Amino acid sequence: MELKSAASSILASSLALKEGEKFLVVTDPDRRRIGEALFEAGAELGAEAALAVMLPREANGEEPPEHVAAAMAAADVVVVPTTHSLTHTRARLQAVERGARVATMPGITEDMFREGAITADYAEVERLTKRVAAALDSAREALVVTGSHRLRMSVEGRNAVASTGVHREPGRSGNLPSGEAFLAPVEGTSEGELLVDGSIAGVGRLSESVLLKISEGMLASASGQEGERLLDLLDGFPKGRSVAELGVGTNDRARLTGVTLEDEKIYGTIHIAFGSNDTFGGTVAAGVHLDAVVLEPELYLDDRLVVGQGLVHI
């Protein structure tokens, strides 16, 4: 009952699910309890609810089966509590282009479904996220400073996405829980080093910081055993090492859990992702998308400090 109550609140407040709408839940066996709670809550709200349980994907960004993608494109509202992310997939993009409201929940746990980032004041999250997205939109170059390490990249001409957690209009989509602004850096321009001290998708919460070396927009090396694990995950896909995303966390209730869905939303953090970015303004379709979260960075946009000392300066 507690899961269903949380599900009802999410569907009403974030997605404005209405009676008679075509509502689809896409899940896998590991997240089935959450999926079933969302399905039952949607049915009780009067929606034409359906539940699709697919085999788990092997990595974040891997496409779902074709028949699941077709069902997503035919729905009015889609919620996706899965082990691996469908956020950066053509299936999600196709559903949005046809007017669906889509909320993805990669790696969601029952604890995260009730506590932490999901409980934020989403009106405030929306306001801050849109301000950060506007700053990213207007910038030409980004500089991320982590200790003595610097990573530069061009963001000129790239449009930012404000993932606010509020998806009430046709064609709106993003994570739940949410709270991040992000964009695709210009391919081939990222250069330097990044010290990652939070978590890495597919690896989890880090036991020690991982130093990433990046050259000509590609991840060249990653230190330690956890860095090697990241390289192994990316190297299973063509172009997996491409720098795909620069993002800023804007949710003050988000916690470090080892699950990227919540970690990348932590207020005052940044994340860099590798792999696909063709679904949000980039040109790389890699079949994988893995984020690396930095807890105490400095982010400069055209020499203006935007993130530093755990604060967003906007």
Image: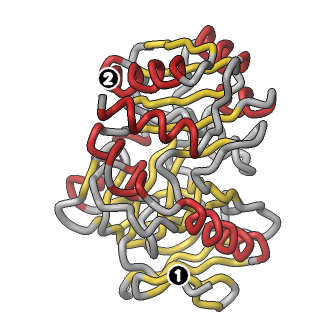
Q: Position of residue 2 (x, y in %)?
A: 30, 34
Given this view, does label 1 or label 2 mark the residue nearer the observer?
A: 2
Give me the C-alpha separation between circle 1 and circle 2. Answer: 36 Å
Residue 290 got which mark? none
Q: Residue furthest left?
A: 207
| Residue highlighted by disc 1 | 312
Nearest to the observer: residue 40 or residue 161: 40
Please tell me which residue is depicted at 17% across the width and 61% down the height of the picture: 207
The image shows residue 73, relative to residue 281, as above or below, that is: above
The image shows residue 75, relative to residue 109, as above or below, that is: above
| Amino acid type, callout 1 | Val
Q: Position of residue 156 (x, y in %)?
A: 78, 70
Q: Is 172 left or right of 267, judged from the image as shown?
A: right
Please say whether residue 157 is visible from this viewpoint: yes
Q: Position of residue 109 (x, y in %)?
A: 30, 39
Give the mark, 1 or 2, whose residue is nearer the N terminus.
Answer: 2
| Amino acid type, callout 2 | Arg
Residue 303: name its quadrant. Answer: bottom right
Please tell me which residue is depicted at 70% across the width and 43% down the height of the picture: 168
Image quarter in which the C terminus is found: bottom right
Q: In the structure shown, which secondary structural element does the residue marked by tag 2 occupy?
A: helix
| Residue highlighted by disc 2 | 33
Q: Is 49 left or right of 130, judged from the image as shown?
A: left
The image shows residue 301, relative to residue 63, as above or below, that is: below
The image shows residue 263, relative to residue 249, as above or below, that is: above
Q: Residues within 10 Å of mark 2 (few under 14, many from 20)?
A: some
Please tell me which residue is depicted at 54% across the width and 57% down the height of the picture: 218
